[in-house]
Amino acid sequence: MTVNIKEFPGTPLSEKDFQKGRILFTEWVPKAHYAWDAGVAIGRYLAELKAGHLIGRQCWGCRRVMIPPRMFCEHCFRPTDEWVYFQDTGTVRTFSLCYVTWDMRELTEPQIPAVIEIDGASKGMGILHLLGEVDPKAVHIGMRVKAVWKPAEEREGAITDIRHFKPL
Amino acid sequence: MSKRRVAIVGAGMTKFVRRAQETGKELAFQASKMALDSCELTLDDIGAVCLGTAPDAFDGVHMKAEYLSDGAGALGKPYMRSYVGGGTGVFAVIQGWYHVASGLFDTCLVVCEEKMSSCQPHPQGAFLTIFDHTTERALGPNLLWIFALEMNAYMTRYGLDKRDIALVSVKNKRNAADHPCALLGDPNITVEDVLNSEVLAWPVQRLDVSPISDGAVAIVLAADHVARRVTDKPVWIEGVGWSLDTAYWTNRDLSYPTYVEEAARMAYKMAGITEPRKQIHIAEPYDPFDYKELHHLEGLLLADKGEAPRLTADGVTQRTGDLPVCPSGGLLGVGNPIAAAGLMKVAEIFWQLRGEAGARQVPGNPKRGVAQAWGDLMQVGTVVVLGV
Ligand SMILES: [Zn+2]
């Protein structure tokens, strides 16, 4: 570092220290349960998912048609104006082939998260979802996809009412 | 705007390690004491303390700033925490700057600490709550997704391949071999090593990513009249900037960091910089992933959109190049204790501009440098311009 400093503090522990239990280790399950109000826009978004529809909101200020829907436009900073129904098709704007779980355990079959631009929404309006029924090697940016819905009786008003998107 | 000139007059840093035996408070103390000692000040000389530290959930301690305050030298002092995720380390300096620039305090100790190793089985668990609880978290996200999606968008937009990006990881890990506090310095690493490393979330591979680490960094800020008394080599904070993009991250253009450009323009304007490529001599952009260094160089207006990979390939960003980038070794090489890593970048520019960076010293007596960090929901840019 600065050439004037000769000693730097900080003591690394070794993997062995950890394995041999020389580290204080405690496990604690937090009682962290949350109940969320989905709010006005997302509340209706979820209800429409249960009915098998994708919806958004339009702002008459900037004309943007937005998904996920919101009751205010963050650009114009005014209330949004109207509900818009979309087709359940779209275009892959970006994706990943993920071979690890969140805690870094290996997956043999990759999960394929993607940002999907929904048809009928303004350009650049994507949502996060997963791709399925597709060869990972065949996935590409620009790929056209369509929602695969759960059967109506299994839907619960959640983003997972769409199982995944598959190639159109 | 009436404001006072503010200088950095001292800096201290612990080793960045994978798991530290020292507690967070102990790390904060080590860095703070070292920063004070480096400019021969004591805590009595300090008017206020600013602390930066990232999520409480890493340590399992809520209100972590208060918990760490004793180690940060905050006893009985005006004390404030900043937290803008990965952007924290540079934002804490901005916060300290306006404490002093405003005239409220003559000196301010800025301390950034992070101990990620406490969180089991993996600190990513603490970060998964970054995703929207209703529309995204139900999909079972992995934190890596967000970076992989961004990297793929960037690569596809400009037709880049992995080799173009791996060069950044190689440069930074090699640079870090000269850093006495580095976790992943490696003088012999090659592009092939990066390309052959485990695929985590394509296009992100193991060696595209900075390591989880523990560590702390601190700097001392002083107003003009104090700075001149304390040191004959003050490093001035010439400009600061920060900006947020939308939290509807899937509605953004993921191939360009607009938030960095906005923050950079604010900082450059304050610093009187009209031609950043000529007037900035050294850069420490935030590099938790190799593509982010490229992304951020473009956001900092130091490269045209899509051109940062070419600058890297041409050697421009090497320590001996026309625009040395991450001569410290960056997060990819030195390590990534989140808030501390951002402040490490500011400390590196401080040491470089004073000619005190030892084996890492860039040639040519650089006069002005920029440090930048990034975080929150991939949406904040924090920028500081330093000069002598
Ligand atoms: Zn609008």
Image: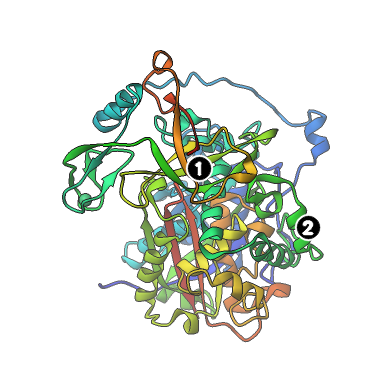
> What is the number of callouts on the image?
2
Residue behind mark 1: A114
- Do the residues at pointers 1 and 2 share their chain? no
**Rendering quarter of residue B310:** bottom right
Relative height, residue B215 to residue B55 (above, below) = below
Residue at (57, 77) in percent of width and height = B353
Protein image colouring: rainbow
- Disc 2 under 8 Å from ligand 1? The reply is no
The residue identified by callout 2 is B193
Q: Does the CB distance between marks 1 and 2 fall below 8 Å?
A: no
Q: Numbered disc 2: what chain?
A: B
In front of the other: B164 or B189:
B164
Q: Which residue is found at the position 35% from the left and 50% from the top? A: B246
Is residue B32 among the parts visible in the rendering? no
In front of the other: A106 or A23: A106
Name which residue lies at 58% across and 59% down: B291
For the N terminus of chain B, the image quarter is bottom left
User: Is residue B314 found left or right of B302 in the rendered image?
Assistant: right
Residue that protrudes farthest toward the top in the picture = A153
